[in-house]
Image (tube, helix red, strand yellow):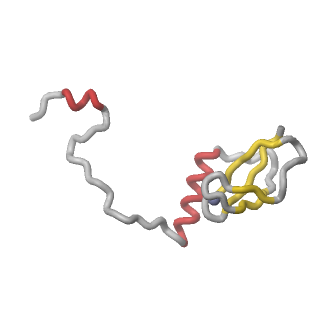
Amino acid sequence: MATYEYRCQQDGSFDTTLPIGTAGTAARCPRCGGPAARVFSAPRLTRTPTPLRHAIDRAERSAETPDVVTRVPARHPVGWSSNPAHARLPRW
Ligand SMILES: [Zn+2]
C-alpha cells in the first residue's frame, strides 16, 4: 500500500491509500465529489502535517475568494463556558 496525494480545486489536498501502482491521475474528492488531480511530491521528505497543510490551503484560498458567511456569528455572554460543570457554579 502507498499513500497518494490529490488536490481538489475547491477543498484542497487529501491523501488516499491504494496498492502500489494502482493510483490514477485523478480521483474523486471525498468532500465535494468533484475531480481532484494527483499531486506528485517527494515521499515523506518534506511532509507537512495534514491539519497544517489544510490550514495553509484554506489561507491561500481565502486570499482571493474569502469564505462568505450568511449570518453574524453568535455572541456569547461574558463568562460563558461550554463546560457543563460551570453552569452549576454560583452566579454573582
Ligand atoms: Zn472537493
Q: Residue furthest left?
A: 92
Q: In this figure, what is the number of numbered marks? A: 0
Question: In x, y percent, where is residue 64?
Answer: 54, 72
Q: Which quadrant: the C terminus?
A: top left
Q: Please say if 48 is above or below 72.
A: above
Q: Which quadrant contains ligand 1?
A: bottom right
x and y, in percent, of residue 67 in the image: 47, 65
Nearer-the-camera pick, 75 or 23: 23
Residue 40, given in percent of the width and then of the height, sits at: 81, 56
Residue at point 31%, 37% (across, down): 82
Q: Position of residue 56 (x, y in %)?
A: 59, 56
91 horizontally vs 77: left or right: left
- In the picture provided, is 51 more to the left or to the right than 47? left
**Nearer the observer, 27 or 20:** 27
User: What residue is rendered at 68% in x and 51% in y?
Assistant: 14
Outermost residue, right side? 21
Residue extending furthest toward the bottom: 64
Residue located 66% across and 65% down the image: 9
The quadrant of the image that shows the N terminus is top right
Q: Residue at x 28, y 38 (%)?
A: 81
Residue 54 placement, left or right of 86: right
